[in-house]
Image: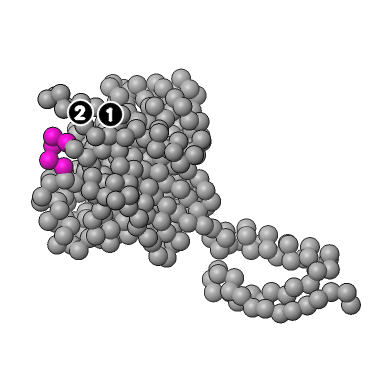
Amino acid sequence: MNSREKRDQANAGCAGVRLTVQYNFEPEVLIRKFIVLLFLFLWCPFAFAGELSVTFFDVGQGDAMLITTPSGKQILLDGGAPPSVLESGESVFSREVLSLLQAQSITHLDGVIISHGHPDHIKGVMTVLKTIPVARVYFPDCGGAAGEYGRCMDSIKQRHIEYTITHAGTSIDIDPAVRVEVFAPPHNFCFDDANNNSMIVRIAYRAVSFLFTGDANTEEQDWCAEKYGVRLRSTILKIPHHGSYNAVNGTFIRAVNPAVGVISCGENPYGHPHEKTLHFYGKEKTALYRTDLRGTIRISTDGSAYAVTTEK
Ligand SMILES: [Zn+2]
Ligand SMILES: [Zn+2]
């Protein structure tokens, strides 16, 4: 017998199956093993998946997040705004998301999710769409045809980029290892305030989940909490509306019950984040991270544990 055999045991990592691995280099045996591994890969892709990470870029006052899925799909969620100047003439700190993506060698995006049409979320997206190939854009209905939102929609259509209009109940299939659910805005009506038509989207990887909330204020949070209750439960919450005073809805936030909250904000004339918001999350014992204080924040997970790293 010209083959060498030794026995080993390993956990297959899927449903607690204990797998016996046998090293035998005869071609027929190798082919059989390849077929078994292929079957395991197809049957249980999670066993071979990598990490899910979310980078909350410090773009100043605005939101811009890069989601990297376990199979390496890259999704931009909102794009912040380019550098701006206050009415007083004072220039405001901000960083352009396009250059932040390019610094990470991102040359293609599998998806762009737009939470809603306000400039501090959408302006940077428009620059990205002009420069980086994007496979598909996801945006909520209720945005209207005017202003930045309308210009962005025109740009998507002119460039023949595939798009999906989302609402409560839409699921986004981008990587079989993660579950992406859209909880809001509602399907049949729009709120008066554009912030309350923000896309609320949950991304779950095994036991760790992220809830992204755009600028949802209390009315949308109320609607969402009533409809979904504990289905909103998530490990990490992108704190709604930059920590605004009118974005703290106890029912909603207690349904989410986050261990970690991230506030994306910079210099601003609106008083974000509000003292009341910080006090509320402090009482709830949510660990808070702010991009204005910590710079870019990255949270990565293997689906059971997570790690937070910050720029400063
Ligand atoms: Zn905003
Ligand atoms: Zn807004």
Task: State yes or no: residue 82 in magenta.
Answer: no
Real-space CA distance between mark 1 and mark 2, rounded to the nearest whole angstrom = 8 Å
The residue that appears at 18% across and 62% down in the rendered structure is 284
Which quarter of the figure is the N terminus placed in? bottom right
Q: Quadrant of residue 257?
A: bottom left
The residue that appears at 46% across and 27% down in the rendered structure is 131
Q: Is residue 49 left or right of residue 172?
A: right
Q: Do the residues bearing badges 1 and 2 touch, measured as CB atoms within 8 Å?
A: yes
Stretch of the chain drawn in magenta: 268-272
Q: Quadrant of residue 251?
A: bottom left
**In this rendering, is residue 61 above or below 50?**
above
The residue that appears at 34% across and 32% down in the rendered structure is 96
**In this rendering, is residue 287 above or below 131?**
below
Q: Quadrant of residue 120?
A: top left
Q: Earlier in the sequence, mark 1 or mark 2?
A: 1
SS at circle 1: loop
User: Which disc, if any, is residue 83?
Assistant: 1
- Disc 1 marks a residue whose amino acid type is Pro
Q: What is the x, y in percent for residue 212?
A: 32, 47
Q: What is the x, y in percent for residue 17?
A: 58, 74
Question: Residue reaching furthest right?
Answer: 1
User: Which disc, if any, is residue 104?
Assistant: none
SS at circle 2: strand
Q: Where does label 2 land, which residue?
A: 91
- Disc 2 marks a residue whose amino acid type is Ser
**In this rendering, is residue 235 above or below 138?**
below
